[in-house]
Amino acid sequence: MKTKVLLTVAIFFATLGLKAQTNYLVIGEDIRLPKDSVERLQLTANLNDFLLSAQKGDKENQWILSTENAETQILLSEMQGIEKSDSMEFYPHLINLEILGDSKTYIVQVAYMGLQNKQPILRACFELLAHKTDTGFLFSSPLVRNTKDWKVKTVGHFIFHYQDTSAENVINQQAKYLTEYDKILNFSKITEYYFC
């Protein structure tokens, strides 16, 4: 019985070792990862898989938190193709990881960096939320969290999110314009807009 348990544990760690060798994500030694080894492995492996899936352009990225799929798809469209340019390749580097007060959510910052003539070049920096689940981690855009205190105005089937009351005039004009086109197109689904 003990031999089977030891063999299973050995195979598990060997598999993790192989997976670590094929990581796409670069994790610096200075990054403070979760102290729990299982949580640390789940978070880094799931983040690696999320980023790989994002670069493949998977519409059904299984690593997205389903309740924030639309917001995260917008972020993914920005991430797709960010790894390549005409002259060089960029790799994702985990540059910051911070746990939020609920202890089940992390703020994750990933920078796509490359080297040219031995000089580091930053192409883009993205912020994500990592949500702990029973089976690992799912990821989402921080858009909903970052705009939770914004004002919200509903006009017909449009929901507008904005910070400043000076945007209300623009919102009224936009709603009128969009309503006219939606009548022509016979479109009436709820649509959300964020005025940044």
Image: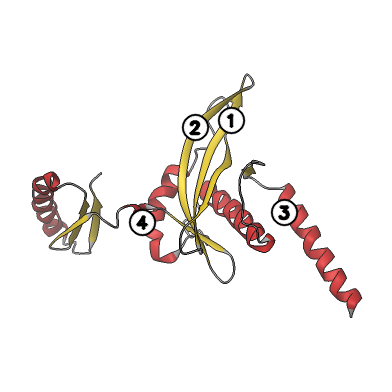
Identify the image quadrant of the N terminus: bottom right
Q: Nearer the viewer, residue 57 or 107?
A: 107
Q: Nearer the viewer, mark 1 or mark 4?
A: 4
Task: Tell me where residue 68 appears, x and y as whole percent.
Answer: 39, 61
What's the distance in space between the residues labelled 2 and 4, CA to CA?
A: 25 Å
Where disc 2 sits, the SS reads strand
Q: Is residue 45 above or below residue 4?
A: above
Q: Amino acid at mark 2?
A: Arg
**N-term mark: 4 or 3:** 3
Residue on which the image places disc 3: 19
Q: CA distance from mark 2 to mark 3?
A: 26 Å
Q: Residue at x 41, y 48 (%)?
A: 75
What residue sits right under mark 1 in the picture?
Answer: 114
Q: Residues at badges 1 and 2 in contact (C-beta under 8 Å)?
A: yes
Disc 1 versus disc 4: distance between alpha carbons?
Answer: 30 Å
The residue where tag 4 is placed is 145
**Residue shown at 87% from the left, 69% from the top:** 7
Q: Are marks 2 and 3 in contact (CB under 8 Å)?
A: no
| Residue at 67%, 47% in the rendered image | 23
Which tag is nearer the camera, tag 2 or tag 4?
A: 4
* Mark 1–mark 2 distance (CA, rounded to whole Å): 8 Å
Q: Please tell me which of labels 1 and 2 falls first in the chain.
A: 1
Q: Which mark is residue 63?
A: none
**Element carrying mark 4:** helix
Q: Which mark is residue 123?
A: 2
Q: Residue at x 50, y 38 (%)?
A: 82
Residue type at mark 1 is Gly
**Residue 119: quarter of image:** top right
